[in-house]
């Protein structure tokens, strides 16, 4: 769903390389800290748009909000560590949470968009990077 990427300064990368085996563990902690910041913002935004401004009474079951979560840290094919904020699948009725989320985000014929992901990404970007930086600095000071 939402994705935030950042480039680490060369000085920080040099410090990380000195950490050896602990660098993966520390990077995972930093990614989790950043993921938590983004998750909180997406959850807040999602809650504020679900069932709001509908022409008919809302049929929201809360299932979409309950399905929101954070993945574990995974390594992609390029060797980069990633963490994702997104929705668990499937719903009880067989529909996909991601489809419902995209309809909310972008709208459809007869339903106006109610963006919650893009604003969350914009608002959380700086605090997310600050949280990751804080974890990296505190963990590196321990080594």
Image: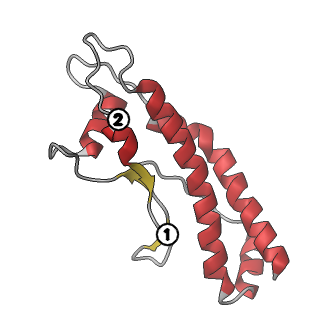
Q: How far across and down, in percent of the image, does residue 139 sit?
A: 77, 73
Residue 39 place in picture, x, y as percent: 52, 47
User: Is residue 40 rendered to the left or right of residue 2?
Assistant: right
Badge 1 vs badge 2, beta-carbon distance below 8 Å = no
Number of disc labels: 2
Query: Of 10 and 112, which appears nearest the observer?
Result: 112
Disc with the residue nearer the chain's start (1 vs 2): 2
Work out which residue is located at the far right of the displayed protein and give it: 141
Q: In this view, does 122 lie to the left or right of 99?
A: right
Coloured how?
secondary structure
Circle on res. 86: none
At x 79%, y 67%, the residue is 137
Q: In this view, does 101 lie above or below 56?
A: below
State the residue at coordinates (29%, 19%): 58
Q: What element carries label 1?
A: loop
Compared across the picture, whether 29 is left or right of 86 comes to right
At horizontal 68% and vertical 46% (from top left) the residue drawn is 127
Residue reaching furthest left?
Answer: 94
Foreground: 102 or 62? 62
Query: Residue 1: x and y, percent?
Result: 39, 49
Q: How far apart are marks 1 and 2 (CA)?
A: 26 Å
Q: How crowded is mark 2: few (under 14 residues within 10 Å), some or many (20 or more)?
A: few
Give the farthest residue toward the top: 55
The residue at which mark 1 appears reads as 73
Q: Name the residue under label 2.
A: 62
Would you identify the image quadrant in which residue 100 lies?
A: top left
SS under mark 2? loop
Q: Position of residue 8 (x, y in %)?
A: 68, 65
The front one of 71 and 127 is 71
């Amino acid at each position: 769903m939402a994705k935030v990427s950042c480039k680490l300064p060369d000085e920080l990368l040099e410090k990380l390389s000195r950490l050896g085996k602990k660098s993966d563990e520390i990077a995972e902690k930093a990614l989790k800290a950043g993921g938590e910041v983004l998750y909180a913002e997406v959850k807040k935004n999602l809650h504020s748009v679900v069932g709001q401004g509908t022409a008919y009474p809302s049929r929201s079951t809360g299932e979409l909000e309950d399905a929101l979560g954070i993945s574990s840290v995974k390594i992609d094919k390029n060797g980069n560590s990633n963490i994702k904020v997104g929705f668990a699948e499937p719903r009880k009725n067989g529909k996909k949470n991601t489809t419902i989320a995209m309809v909310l985000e972008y709208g459809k014929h007869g339903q106006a968009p109610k963006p919650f992901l893009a604003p969350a990404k914009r608002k959380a970007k700086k605090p997310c990077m600050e949280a990751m930086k804080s974890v990296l600095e505190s963990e590196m000071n321990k080594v």
